[in-house]
Amino acid sequence: MPNRGQIINSRHRLARLRPVDWLAVGGLSLVVAALFAMFHHWGNTTDVRLWGRSAFGWLVTRWGDSGPSLGGGDYSHGLLIPIISLGLLWFRRAELGRATKSISYLGLVALVGALLLHYVGAKGQQTRLTLFALIGLTWAIPTYLYGRKVGALLLFPCAYLIFAVPFDFLGELATFLQGIMTRSSAVLLNALGLPVQQVGNQLFGDGYAFNVDVPCSGIRSLQALTALTAIYAYLTQTGFVRKWVLFLSAFPLAVIGNMARVISVVLVAEGLDADFASGTYHDMSGFVVFAVAVVLMVAVGALLSKLSKERIFPWSKRVAASPTSA
């Protein structure tokens, strides 16, 4: 029968570590501290007086939209991304514990490549490249130390951190999405029997006129919905193709959600009051976007879950059943 000391040691596993284990923990802690210092003190070289030298500081500032030419909470969801990634690691902790551990030189190659990417980002004043390098290191280091099986389990949680990085180039799509949103909303409203005329990015009706601005184009909800759809596809879909189909559906879902918002604003103007629709309701109608998009996302996911691989690709079953040639 185990004595009291053995029971205590079984509960406090740190007390059972060997000296070599403590040495490994200490060495890994030094590596993490060195990397943190590197990205904190030499992580940002873009307008250092405004952003500071820390890549972490640059990222958190962009999440708060407090920099120049920012505003509207485009990247405020970024704060949740690292929390979700940590939750995914906790969710798969049992699999990580059971995975076979070994040294993987693939992880070493990725580690060297991430460090080179950080150097290029710092020299080229591209903080996003530095952050991509940091994300790469979060995968490369444990893969090098524990092997490819651990790396495979860590791939999505680490890659998901990309959604925390602001992508300003998506703003270039705003004008394109504005046109689609305005034209589609005008067509649907006229189909519903509401006489609406489109002039550029404006919708004119009986006693009201609405301008479909950049926030109504869908660009803001697109960035948040891609992150939401990615995690939903990862947790609910089993096939590689189905995961990607559901993830890519975030783009049309964002457009449909914002179309529903524009149409609801016009309906409120027609049925209640134009001033209320363009003011109070317009400011509160952001929930319509996500309500419609999330409902459709769940519906698409449920549909994909019912479709087996054989139904989507009926030829795959025949190929698998056919004898292989010598």
Image (cartoon, rainbow, N blue to C red):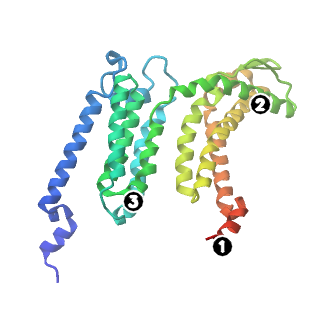
The residue sitting at 34% across, 21% down in the picture is: 45
Q: Residue at x 67, y 37 (%)?
A: 257
Give the percent coordinates (x, y) of residue 323: 66, 73
Label ID, residue 301: none
User: What amino acid is at disc 1?
Assistant: Pro
Q: Residue at x 37, y 31 (%)?
A: 130
Q: Is residue 8 left or right of residue 113?
A: left
Quarter where residue 121 is shown: top left
Above or below, comparing residue 57 to residue 24 in the picture? above
Image coordinates for residue 255, horizontal then vertical, percent: 68, 35
Percent coordinates x, y for residue 26 in the rendering = 17, 50
Q: Nearer the viewer, residue 241 or 60?
A: 241
How many discs appear?
3
> On the rendered structure, is 157 left or right of 24?
right
Q: Secondary structure at mark 1?
A: loop
Mark nearest the camera among 2 and 1 is 1
* Of pointers 3 and 1, the one earlier in the residue sequence: 3
State which quarter of the image contains the C terminus. Answer: bottom right
Sequence-earlier tag: 2 or 1: 2
Which residue does the image show at 26% across and 32% down from the upper left? Answer: 38
**Nearer the observer, 35 or 288:** 35
Residue 207 placed where, x, y %?
Answer: 80, 17
| Front residue of this view, candidates 80 and 176 | 176
Q: Quadrant of residue 44?
A: top left
Give the labeled residue for mark 2.
Answer: 184
Q: Secondary structure at mark 2?
A: helix
* Residue that carries the numbered disc 3 in the rendered image: 149
Cα distance between the residues tagged 2 and 1? 51 Å
Q: Name the amino acid, label 3.
A: Lys
Image quadrant containing the N terminus: bottom left
Q: Label 1 belongs to which residue?
A: 323
- Real-space Cα distance between discs 3 and 1? 31 Å
